[in-house]
Image (cartoon, rainbow, N blue to C red):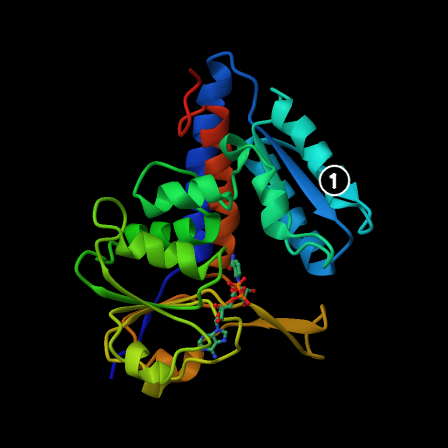
Amino acid sequence: MMNAKLIDGSLVSSIVRNEVREDVNSWTAAGNRPPFLEVIQVGADPASTVYIGAKTRACHDVGIQTHTTHLQDTISAKELKALIRGMNENPEIDGILVQLPLPAHLSALDVIESIDYRKDVDGFHPMNVGRLAIDQPTFRSCTPAGIFELLRYYSLPVKGKHAVVVGASNIVGSPTAIMFSRENSTGKATTTICHKYTKDLTAYTITADILVVAAGSPELIRGEMVKEGVVIIDVGMTRVADETSEKGYKLVGDVHFESVEKKASWITPVPGGVGPMTVAMLMKNTLLAAKKSIYPEE
Ligand code: NAD
């Protein structure tokens, strides 16, 4: 019977942010202008507004300049892409981020593909995902990069372990699984990816040394589905109504914390686990974009 130690995303994210702040300071002290992040919000989805608020505050905190363009949810794909093209060509803008989800009439992939991949600080452009898949330097999408930063900070070994990723979305599950599975850079783990078509999920989760859950299904993973000593990364964040909270809701993870923490060696809480890391890694990517570290200018 184990009692899991907590993986503290608030702590690690503040360490990453401090590092970025110091790097931004030396970058500007060397005579460069501060990095600049342009955020695009289409419509007024309340969760998106909260996320953009967190990103804006983080930018101010580390010395990155930022601006949010607010657009009506009726904007056409053509108009939106024309606007993005203008930002691609603007040398004062280092990073461009389109806050997802987009309204139903817009294709996220189509819009993301119109961003210059050298400014794609979310790491969602097929060029960056493709480079991740072939183990080349790239903008790594922020949530998976944050997961690896947590594992690195706590010196939790990945090489040769069995990593099981539950969830296969383009923004979390798939890039996380790619990162675990690559042989040369981050991962070196034997990797299993599960999704909604997986039959008998427990058959896989029970064999995981590292279990990442990004399904968006509250408390999907319970104690009986994992083995003793597993490291658990809970990416899930579902808003569940809660009258006792000021906001009227609480965030619930994909892992049933009480039953799993008795068996796990390490576990991320929700909130305060993966969540804060995503924004910290966005700051890191924006600085990399400003410094042209991934794609040097010819
Ligand atoms: P998504 O809905 O795009 O994808 C969910 C994936 O999980 C799909 O591949 C689906 O097949 C799989 N899945 C769903 N139910 C399953 C089940 N019962 N068994 C096995 N697989 C199942 O979601 P997403 O955008 O990847 O986000 C997943 C969760 O992570 C959400 O709760 C989201 O809010 C959260 N999230 C958190 C952060 C963060 O902490 N920074 C960032 C992004 C997403």
Task: Look at 48% across and 74% down and name the residue there.
Answer: 254
- The residue beneath circle 1 is 78
Quadrant assignment for the C terminus? top left
User: Which residue is painted at 44% across and 64% down in the image?
Assistant: 168
Picture quarter with the N terminus: bottom left
Per the image, label 1 sits on a secondary structure element best described as helix
Respond yes or no on whether mark 1 lies under 8 Å from ligand 1: no
Total number of numbered discs in the rendering: 1
Dot 1 crowding, Cα within 10 Å, few <14, some 14–19, many 20+? few
Quarter of the image holding residue 64? top right
Asked if residue 267 is positioned above or below residue 35 in the image, the reply reads below
Q: Is residue 154 visible?
A: no
Residue drawn at point x = 36 percent, y = 49 percent? 149
Q: Position of residue 177 (x, y in %)?
A: 35, 59
Considering every residue shown, the one lying at the far left of the view is 160
From what the image shows, is residue 196 above or below residue 73?
A: below
The image quadrant of residue 233 is bottom left
Could you say which is closer to the camera, residue 294 or residue 234?
Answer: 294
Q: Residue at x 56, y 18 (%)?
A: 33
Who is closer to the viewer here, 52 or 70? Answer: 70
Q: Is residue 188 visible?
A: yes
Percent from the top left, x then y, of residue 47? 68, 59
Relative height, residue 245 to residue 53 (above, below): below
Query: In the image, is residue 283 above or below residue 43?
Result: above
Residue 41 drawn at (x, y percent): 72, 46
Left or right of 62: which side holds 242? Answer: right
x%, y% of residue 179?
A: 33, 52
Given residues 136 and 99, the one toward you in this image is: 136
Q: Say which amino acid is labelled 1.
A: Lys
Side of 161 where 38 appears, left or right: right
